[in-house]
């Protein structure tokens, strides 16, 4: 009997219990799955979310892996008590949700939809937008999500280039890396998408200096991490017109405080961290596949490298 502790909170348990039990049955795994843990020393796997009340992993001496339900792991990867393998969530449905959010908001800004939807003066301006092929897009972060979004944007004609901290050899994407590569990737970009993890090296990667490299009036989309942007610098860039609009899905503090300037700024759209929400039915299959692999002595999928933070 495999003992699985669901340490991701009661609200998630109500949504995940049935999909997890179904996936375990389909995989032929006989398991004791519970949101309660009477004896940590008997737990084989922990299904986890970083906002869990479990923050000390020391008692879980038999645990083979901690299986995160979120793609982001910055709130757990530095935990000094975590000695067990940590696997992040890589889910096709999560990727599809991110693609749709990025493509939808990129097209919204590209086509100038806001000025037609919100047109109280009934202004009649028949000037068409440029074609997608004339609107350069830059994606910061070329992991699985960044590459998927790049392909989606390319599919409707946008010229896409990307940047990552380390060199990526991607046949269909003009990719850059390093400090000089970041400047090359951002210079002249009219739409910028942030899909980097939060690390010491990526915090405030968009600041006064780097925002100044964008094409005047560029649109900024951040479904990655709130810490990637210097909020004060972004507000100044919005006020000066350096940035034309920012659509933000993630923030340094969530929920975004009611008195935060982003709420009131006319050139900011706030979405409530919905770009790539974990969906129980598909995520359960990802988690159970790693449990199956662990029981079979196979390598885990989507292992986190603590030295890189993701």
Image: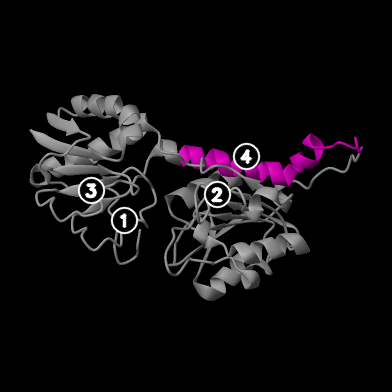
Between marks 4 and 3 in the image, the one whose residue lies nearer the viewer? 3
Asked if the residue under mark 2 is in contact with the one under mark 3, i.e. CB atoms within 8 Å, the reply is no
Q: Label 3: which residue? A: 66
| Residue 122 is a magenta residue | yes
190 or 35, which lies in front? 35
Q: Residue at x 74, y 49 (%)?
A: 266
**Element on which disc 1 rests:** loop
* 3D distance between C-alphas at marks 4 and 2: 22 Å
What number is the disc on residue 104? 4
Does residue 303 appear left or right of residue 193 in this picture? left
| Residue 67 is a magenta residue | no
* 3D distance between C-alphas at marks 3 and 1: 10 Å
Q: Does residue 5 show up?
A: yes
Which is nearer the N-term, disc 4 or disc 2? 4
294 or 6, which lies in front? 6
Q: Which residues are magenta?
A: 95-123
Q: Quadrant of residue 16?
A: top left
How packed is label 1: few (under 14 Cα within 10 Å), some, or many (20 or more)? many
272 or 209, which lies in front? 272
**Considering the image in quadrants, where does the N terminus appear?**
top left
Which is nearer the N-term, disc 1 or disc 4? 1
Between marks 1 and 2 in the image, the one whose residue lies nearer the viewer? 2
Which is nearer the N-term, disc 3 or disc 2? 3
**Element on which disc 2 rests:** loop
């Amino acid at each position: 009997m495999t003992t699985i502790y669901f340490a991701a909170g009661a609200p998630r348990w109500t949504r995940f219990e049935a999909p997890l039990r179904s996936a375990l049955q389909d995989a032929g795994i006989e398991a004791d799955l519970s949101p309660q843990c009477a004896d940590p020393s008997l737990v084989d796997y922990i299904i986890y979310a970083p906002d869990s009340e479990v923050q000390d992993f020391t008692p879980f001496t038999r645990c083979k892996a901690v299986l995160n339900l979120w793609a982001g792991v910055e709130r757990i990867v530095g935990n000094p008590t975590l000695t067990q393998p940590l696997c992040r969530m890589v889910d096709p449905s999560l990727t599809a949700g991110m693609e749709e959010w990025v493509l939808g908001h990129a097209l919204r800004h590209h086509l100038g939809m806001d000025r037609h939807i919100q047109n109280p003066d009934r202004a009649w301006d028949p000037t068409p937008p440029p074609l997608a092929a004339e609107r350069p897009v830059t994606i910061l972060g070329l992991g699985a999500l960044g590459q998927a979004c790049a392909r989606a944007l390319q599919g409707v004609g946008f010229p896409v280039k990307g940047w990552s901290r380390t060199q990526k050899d991607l046949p269909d994407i003009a990719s850059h890396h390093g400090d000089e590569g970041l400047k090359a990737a951002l210079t002249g970009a009219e739409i910028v998408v942030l899909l980097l993890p939060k690390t010491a090296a990526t915090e405030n990667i968009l600041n006064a200096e780097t925002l100044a490299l964008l094409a005047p009036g560029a649109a900024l989309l951040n479904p990655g991490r709130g810490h990637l942007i210097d909020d004060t610098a972004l507000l100044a860039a919005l006020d000066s017109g350096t940035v034309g609009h920012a659509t933000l899905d993630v923030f340094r503090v969530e929920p975004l405080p009611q008195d935060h300037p982003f709420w009131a700024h006319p050139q900011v759209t706030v979405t409530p961290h919905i770009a790539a929400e974990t969906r129980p039915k598909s995520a359960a299959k990802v988690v159970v596949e790693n449990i199956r692999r662990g029981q079979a002595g196979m390598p885990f999928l989507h292992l986190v490298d603590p030295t890189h933070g993701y």
